Image (tube, rainbow, N blue to C red):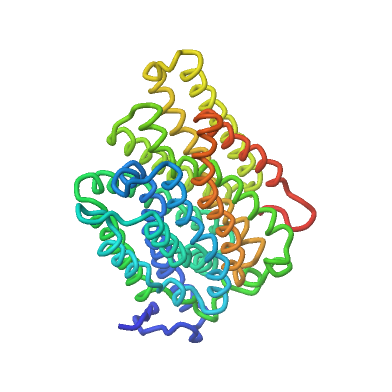
Amino acid sequence: MSAVATGPDCKPFRPGAVAAPSEAAALRANHRWKVLGIGVAANACFSATFSGIPATAVFLRSGYHLSNGELGMALGLLGLGVALSELPWGLLTDRWGDRRVLLTATAVWLLVMAALIVPSPAHIPGIALLAAALLVTGLLGGSVNGSSGRAIMAWFGEGERGFAMSIRQTAVPLGGGLGALVLPSLASAHGFTAVFGLLAAASAVSTSLAWRWLHQPPVHDDTNSSSTALPAGPAPLRNPAVWRIATAIGLLCFPQVAVLTFASVFLHDFAGMGTAVISASLAAVQVGAMVMRVWSGRYTDRHGNRRSFLRLCSLLSLIAFTVLAALVLLAAQFLSGQVPMLSPAIVAMLVVAGICVSSWHGVAYTELATLAGASQAGTALGLANSLVFIAFFLVPIAIPGLLVLCSWAGVWLGAAICALIAWPIFLPSSDGRKSA
């Protein structure tokens, strides 16, 4: 069945066809929520993969017989795959359209992993094979982020894009939260065949939705006029303002990635928490981030203060990770390792820090896409996500080394420093338009 939308008179509307203004407005009002839903579904499925697999880190380490360094390398290559593919996928999205780019083979590859790259009593896949498999997963999955964001920029008007993009960004904590709740227990009870098989099934569902409903808005649509569709300045890769925001987004993701990839190991090894507490803590981070993303999108749409909100998130993240590092140092150094006394406070502060550093994405991506213009939003979002997933590559590799040099206190202090560096980059500058 082809992807055909219907207008208010129930006649089929073909993508790229000319529609009357009233028909186009009615189509937009009815269909844009399907487009947003597809974006949410696609991002949630991939988030369940790139956030859910690290949530199984304890079982990955034991099931595949990995050291902390090998674990970090494997998880880091998942992020590297996305980082390498995001910008090319973004450029292809601007050229081919969202629908073609979203129809990738991620589900097929995850099914291959479920069948061939899982530990069993007879065979334990080596670190090289596991790392290569996760790298390919990232390369294929990188198609999701820029393409679904560009579709939302095309279907929603300026006064509602922050809200819509923030709803789309709730898919990241939604998928990550579901992954954190389900995948560790699934890995423990049924192994990684079940983990990769479930992720493959979810990806197949989101692909079918994109095939059915995702297309470009009608041609004669006043809300998709040249004022919103054309770039607001130079081409994204030659626009200094786009590079500033993209760089700040990448930097502020370093502490977020630290939480997503190694929080489970931290809570298990340092705080002595079990699987239930670890899953609940990571899920709380994702649910809190999801709520904050929706609220922040609506709030900044109404007040036109995206840059100041982003600076506030950087400041709150700096404070939260500094307090977390202090609690860890207090438990390790001054209480002679009596961690259980501070375990509730440590878990609570980790959740607070994780929410603070995960609540700003919709606002930041809206600001970035607005600077680039809706017609080139795929390239700008691809650039930002390339920098984001460089963090997913570097952070898991760096954390084992930081643990050797300065323990968990140094890891969380490093996260605080990244938030501190990001803060001034979000300041408006004269090289691009200011926040809406």
Of residues 99 and 374, which is closer to you in this image? 99
Q: Position of residue 144 (x, y in %)?
A: 46, 65
Residue 48: image quadrant is: bottom left
Residue at 46% from the left image edge and 28% from the top image edge: 349
Q: Position of residue 5 (x, y in %)?
A: 38, 78
Q: Is residue 393 left or right of residue 185?
A: right
Residue 115: image quadrant is: bottom left
User: Is residue 423 placed above or below 372 in the rendered structure?
Assistant: above
Disc tally is 0
Residue at 51% from the left image edge and 29% from the top image edge: 407
Whether residue 174 is visible here, answered yes or no, is no
Image quadrant occupied by the N terminus: bottom left
Whether residue 252 is visible here, answered yes or no, is yes
Residue found at the very far top of the displayed protein: 335
Q: Is residue 297 left or right of residue 345?
A: right
User: Is residue 354 placed above or below 436 in the rendered structure?
Assistant: above
Of residues 309 and 278, which is closer to you in this image? 278
Q: Is residue 125 left or right of residue 225?
A: left
Residue found at the very far right of the displayed protein: 430
Residue at 38% from the left image edge and 31% from the top image edge: 269
Q: Position of residue 297 (x, y in %)?
A: 53, 50
Of residues 369 and 342, which is closer to you in this image? 342
Image quadrant occupied by the C terminus: bottom right
Q: Is residue 1 left or right of residue 315?
A: left
User: Is residue 132 placed above or below 358 in the rendered structure?
Assistant: below
Residue at 26% from the left image edge and 48% from the top image edge: 187
Q: Position of residue 328 (x, y in %)?
A: 49, 24
Of residues 185 and 307, which is closer to you in this image? 185
